[in-house]
Structures are given as C-alpha cells and as structure tokens.
Amino acid sequence: MQIPNNAVVLVADGRKSLFLRNEGDATHLNLVVERAVEQINPSDGDQKTDHAGRASSSVGGGQNSMQEVDFHQQEKDRFAVDTADLLKRRALANDFASLFVVAPPQTLGELRKHYHSEVSARLSGELDKDLTSHPIDQIEKALQAA
C-alpha cells in the first residue's frame, strides 16, 4: 500500500486508536504518533450486575426472553462512533488530505457506518487487521506489504 507523505493513518480497534502521520514518503514510511486514545472497557460480564429478565407477553399469554445487552460491544461501537466523529472534525478542518484506516473487520464496519462525506472523500485505503498493540515499525511493515 502506497502511503504518501503527510497522510494520516488511523490504527484502531474498539478500545484504542492511534493517529499516525507519515513523515516519510510512499516507499519509506516514517509513521509518527500524533494522538493516542484508549478507553477502559471491561468485559461484558464485569459490566453486568444482573442476568436478563423475562417479560410476560400480553398477546398469546406466553413469555418472551428480553434481549440481553452486550455492554462491552456497545462500548466498542460507541468508541468507533467517537473516532469517526474525530475524523470528521479533522477532515472539516483540512487537517489531512489522505487517510488510511487499519482496524479489525467489525470495527472497520462500524467506522464506515459513521464516516462523514468529507472523511469518505479523503479515504485512500483500508486494511482489515488489528494492529493496535503492535509497535510502529511492525505497523509500517504491514502497510507496505498490503
């Protein structure tokens, strides 16, 4: 993947995001961290205090199970929405001309749902991998190999 000088690379999952800028060129990446955001998001079981209840149905007299909310996934989705909003604000401020996003498939899908048109217009590439816990040099290698 060719990443031009001054392009922004977002490496994110549902809990952490790294905003990197390429200070190198397309063939010799030099990604520098501009901003790192991390959210504490305990497992779903640690966030729940009770099990899902049961509700009586007035139609037919039967019982229906109430949907159990996955609080951990809900927070991951909210984090993706907040990240997409930050991308929108940066795009509207003309902070970047070219954007590359690296995220696991589920996070990438959630981000896509919330891209502003200015973000979509500047989106130059995506890579569906989870690289948030990798060092910068390994992120650079993964991008060059993609």
Image (spheres, rainbow, N blue to C red):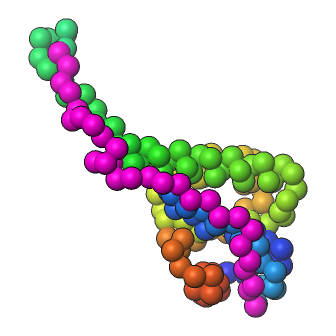
The quarter holding residue 126 reads bottom right
Q: Position of residue 58 (x, y in %)?
A: 19, 8
Q: Let me know if residue 20 is in the magenta part.
A: no
Number of numbered tags placed on the structure image? 0
Q: Position of residue 51 (x, y in %)?
A: 21, 35
Magenta span includes 47: yes
Q: x, y percentage for residue 80?
A: 57, 51
Q: Which image quarter holds the C terminus? A: bottom right
Q: Residue at x 76, y 90 (%)?
A: 27
Depth check: 42 or 55 in front?
42
Task: Identify the residue at horizontal 28%, vertical 32% (top origin).
Answer: 67
Residue at 75 percent of width and 85 percent of height: 30
In the image, 64: left or right of 43? Answer: left
- Give how far across and how far down residue 117 sits, in percent: 75, 47
Residue at horizontal 53%, vertical 54%? 39
Q: Tell me if residue 73 can be seen.
A: yes
* Left or right position of 22 against 61: right
- Which is more toward the observer, 95 or 59? 95
Q: Nearer the viewer, residue 107 or 48?
A: 48
- Determine the residue located farthest toward the top in the rendered image: 58
The part of the image, by quadrant, that contains residue 37 is bottom right
Left or right: where 134 falls relative to 5: left
Residue 107 in view: no
Q: Which residues are magenta?
A: 28-56
Residue at the farthest bottom position: 28
**Residue farthest to the right?**
94
Q: Is residue 106 left or right of residue 68?
A: right
**Residue 137 drawn above or below residue 8:** below
- The answer to which of 9 and 2 lies nearer the viewer is 9
Quarter of the picture holding the N terminus? bottom right
